[in-house]
């Protein structure tokens, strides 16, 4: 069977400038991969991200390098088998591998006439609610963002000189649960000191407080922090899970960093066996990527799937959220379609 591969690239303006400890984004560049068998089409996404050396050019070049394989996918080959075939060729660009892997999972599920998540979960019960992310800004602006979008759980980006004050001030405008993400900006001492105060402010956990390679510091935090510490930048690929289990309470799996749904499922399996709390998170991406991500929700303790909510205009239809609750689109696959 001959498959048709199409790559689209988009520029997605954000509703508000989005700042983390490393940089500010006002327009998110992204690519969408379509894989079609002539009857069904699957969609996958990968964003541009300077921290992970992902650019539109590098994504397109990587996909072009495996186009011959993709055009001649053996009929009904399982997505895990295709991933194993592609991974050695895309080892230097897991973002591109993710776009292809998720597009093919979407297509495969449509061919099998079932929602994608039914390959690993029979029911949509006790699904985690997604948080809504508040980027670093002036405190009044951060407060207004919360008031603009009432939500049961907020992830608050930190990494400033007044992080505790930010949470104290935000607590004045909402009783919702907070999660904080320092994006590698804190020291061990800051983390321990902040955790003691943040726990009293109804903060659920701290995500990646230290530099990604500070394993010694993270080991100390796992032992002494009064709040759970969740790995993000330290847990990028399948091989990182076992190492993170020794020094973190949980991990945040990002599909683009690990190379798609195929390795994410393996990461979840290993994390469960090691007793880790499991979260999956997003980049600032469209509903294409978010619809693929939320298919993992039945396997997760936490989910951060608000990327498309931060955009001025989406490019796709698919999963939506009702006050944090996942509302899957009808239909098979991920339920996502380009508009």
Image (cartoon, rainbow, N blue to C red):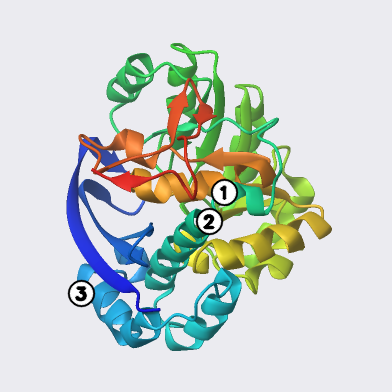
Q: How far apart are marks 3 and 2 (CA)?
A: 29 Å
Q: Do the residues labelled 3 and 2 touch (CB within 8 Å)?
A: no
Contact between labelled residues 1 and 3, with CB atoms less than 8 Å apart: no
Front label number (3 vs 2) = 2
Residue 38, percent from left and from top = 32, 65
For image coordinates 34% across by 33% down, the residue present is: 309
Q: Could you say which quadrant of the image residue 321 lies in? A: top left
Query: Earlier along the polypeptide chain: callout 3 or callout 2?
Result: 3
Of callouts 2 and 1, which one flags the residue occurring earlier in the amino acid sequence? 2
Residue bearing the label numbered 1: 114
Q: Where is residue 152 in the image (x, y as percent from the top left)?
A: 53, 20
Where's the C terminus, which quadrant? top left
Q: Can residue 136 be seen in this view?
A: no
User: 174 left or right of 265?
Assistant: left
Label 1 CA crowd tier, 10 Å (few <14, some 14–19, many 20+): some
Residue 237 numbered mark, or none? none
On screen, residue 288 above or below 172: below
Give the label on residue 57, or none: 3
Tell me whether circle 2 and circle 1 mark residues in contact (CB < 8 Å).
Answer: yes
Q: Earlier in the sequence, mark 3 or mark 1?
A: 3
Name the residue tied to disc 2: 109
Q: Distance between the residues labelled 3 and 1?
A: 34 Å
Mark 3 residue crowding within 10 angstroms, few (<14) / some (14–19) / many (20+): few
Task: From the viewer's side, name the closer residue of 238 and 67.
Answer: 67
- The answer to whether residue 321 is seen in the rendering is yes
Q: Is mark 2 on a helix, strand or loop?
A: helix
Q: Looking at the picture, how far across and down is residue 153, in whole percent?
A: 53, 26
Quadrant in the picture for residue 240: bottom right
Who's the residue at 70% across and 30% down the image?
A: 126
Q: Is residue 289 left or right of residue 279?
A: left
């Amino acid at each position: 069977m001959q498959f048709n591969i199409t790559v689209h690239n988009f520029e997605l303006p954000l509703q508000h400038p989005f700042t983390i400890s490393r940089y500010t984004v006002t327009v998110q560049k992204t690519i969408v991969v379509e894989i079609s068998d002539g009857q069904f089409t699957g969609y996958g996404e990968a964003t541009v991200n300077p921290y992970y050396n992902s650019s539109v050019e590098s994504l397109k070049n990587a996909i072009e390098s495996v186009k011959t394989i993709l055009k001649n996918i053996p009929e009904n080959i399982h997505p895990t088998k295709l991933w194993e075939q592609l991974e050695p060729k895309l080892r230097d660009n897991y973002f591109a591998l993710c776009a292809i892997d998720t597009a093919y999972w979407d297509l495969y599920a449509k061919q099998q006439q079932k929602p994608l998540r039914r390959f690993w979960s029979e029911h949509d019960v006790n699904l985690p609610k997604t948080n809504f992310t508040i980027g670093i800004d002036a405190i009044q602006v951060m407060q207004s963002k919360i008031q603009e979008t009432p939500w049961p759980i907020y992830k608050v980006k930190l990494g400033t000189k007044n992080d505790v004050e930010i949470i104290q001030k935000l607590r004045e405008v909402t009783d919702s649960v907070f999660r904080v993400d320092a994006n590698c900006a804190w020291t061990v001492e800051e983390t321990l000191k902040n955790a003691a105060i943040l726990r009293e402010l109804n903060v659920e956990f701290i995500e990646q407080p230290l530099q990604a390679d500070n394993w010694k510091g993270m080991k100390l935090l796992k032992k002494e922090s009064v709040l759970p510490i969740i790995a993000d930048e330290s847990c990028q690929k399948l091989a990182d899970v076992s190492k993170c289990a020794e020094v973190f309470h949980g991990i945040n799996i990002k599909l683009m960093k690990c190379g798609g749904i195929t390795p994410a499922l393996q990461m979840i399996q290993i994390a469960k066996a090691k007793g880790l709390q499991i979260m999956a998170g997003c980049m600032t991406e469209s509903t294409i990527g978010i619809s693929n991500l939320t298919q993992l929700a039945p396997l997760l303790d936490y989910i951060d799937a608000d990327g498309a909510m931060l955009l001025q205009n989406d490019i796709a239809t698919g999963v939506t959220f009702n006050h944090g609750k996942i509302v899957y689109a009808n239909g098979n696959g991920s339920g996502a379609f380009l508009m």
